[in-house]
Image: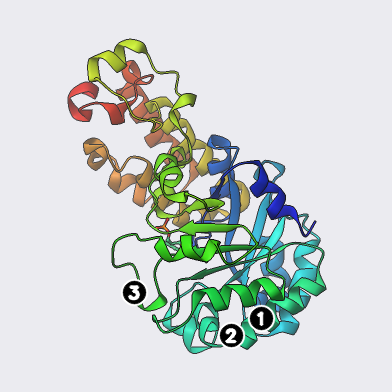
Amino acid sequence: MKDFWSKQAAKWKMCFLAPMDGYGDSAYRQTMKRVAPHIYLISEFYSADGLVHSQFLADSVLPHQDMEKPVVIQIFGKNPENFTKAAKIIERHNVAGIDINMWCPAKKVVRSWHGSSLFINEELAYEIVDTLNKATKLPISVKTRLSFDGNQDLIKFAKGLENAGASLLTIHWRTAKQAYTGNADFTNIYELKKHVWVPVICNGDIINYEDGMKKVQDLDGFMIGRWSFGNPWCFLWAPHVDMKSELIDNNNFIDSIYHPTLWEILSTMEFHATKLVEVKWERKWSLEIRKHLVQYLKSFPWVRDYRKRLVTTESIENSREVIDEIRNRYIKSLDLRPSLWELDELLD
Ligand SMILES: Cc1cc2nc3c(=O)[nH]c(=O)nc-3n(C[C@H](O)[C@H](O)[C@H](O)COP(=O)(O)O)c2cc1C
């Protein structure tokens, strides 16, 4: 089981959904996987201490569906003993692995020596990986960055993590201090790959499968986060598209990006909303779905006609009403791939 990641890496370039707090719950993951069955899913991060001390948290966030497999649970913390206890709880849920968050730059996380600050507390980082690795049969991976503030040595850190038992490393190309600034540059990650045995995944500003495959080079895979918002199709490539030949002629369209039909978009919205109701209780559900549904329609100028209702939806019925209304309005255009066209013109 510990060789899970190297076995996966031997098959083909791996494509991951990034862990995202407030997004990567079971409903989001099922939605991504329904569209892109080949991807690997990492959950949003959960506190190792929280999982140990709150049965309620563990029972709410760890259960998942078969369709999500292989799913990895990401945890953060600084107390090796609690990582061990958390692993025992996570193990009961039949997951593919545990990922340790050494990525998070948030001030309150860094100040309490969690997340990316482990980069400047290397010995503790190694101890956490070592203890966790010995405590569970699950493979342990780490998600981290180029460095904390530019003054740390990625290769040294990554080798330390590998020696401690990490069997997959995901590297985001920025330092913690950079927040979300700068232009994507994976040079240091390509260099790292020459120095470690374990699979290396790159992350940061990858917009779709095509972009990921261009950037991955000798690495073992790539991870997409924000571009998946309302866009599970970012993980697909065009051979999946049953593109009408006249469409290609009319648009002189040659790219390998998957463009979903309006029907696919609306049915995916409905699926996502339905899964959120199943996963979360109604009130929490309605608050969460508000941020998701509009994302699916963000590139359509006519989203303005629905935005207010989507971001204030109170129930699944509310959301379905809006989706049905859009479906009826564009009933003749449902099998078109709107991102290929002048959206307003074609659809109204
Ligand atoms: C809303 C949000 C929440 C995030 N939460 C986490 C998290 O829980 N754990 C983690 O390792 N990274 C987290 N990240 C970082 C992403 O996993 C990813 O590294 C980052 O967004 C860069 O990738 P992207 O450019 O593809 O979005 C989060 C990012 C966003 C936007």
Q: Amino acid at mark 2?
A: Glu
Which residue lies at the image location 22% right of the left edge and 22% below the top edge?
346
Residue 115, x across and y down, in percent? 53, 77
Q: CA distance from mark 2 to mark 3?
A: 20 Å
Q: Residue at x 39, y 44 (%)?
A: 211
Residue 291 shows up from this direction: yes
* Element assignment for label 3: helix
Which residue occupies the extreme left position in the image? 345
Residue 31 sits above or below residue 60 on the image: above
Amino acid on which the number 1 mark rests in the picture: Tyr
Q: Amino acid at mark 3?
A: Gln
Looking at the rendered image, the quarter that the C terminus falls into is: top left
Question: What's the distance in space between the residues labelled 2 and 1, CA to CA?
Answer: 6 Å
**Label 1, on which residue?**
126
Instruction: Report if residue 230 is visible in the image.
Output: no
Locate residue 216, reporting x and y percent: 47, 50
Q: Quadrant of residue 169?
A: bottom right
The quadrant in which the N terminus is found is bottom right
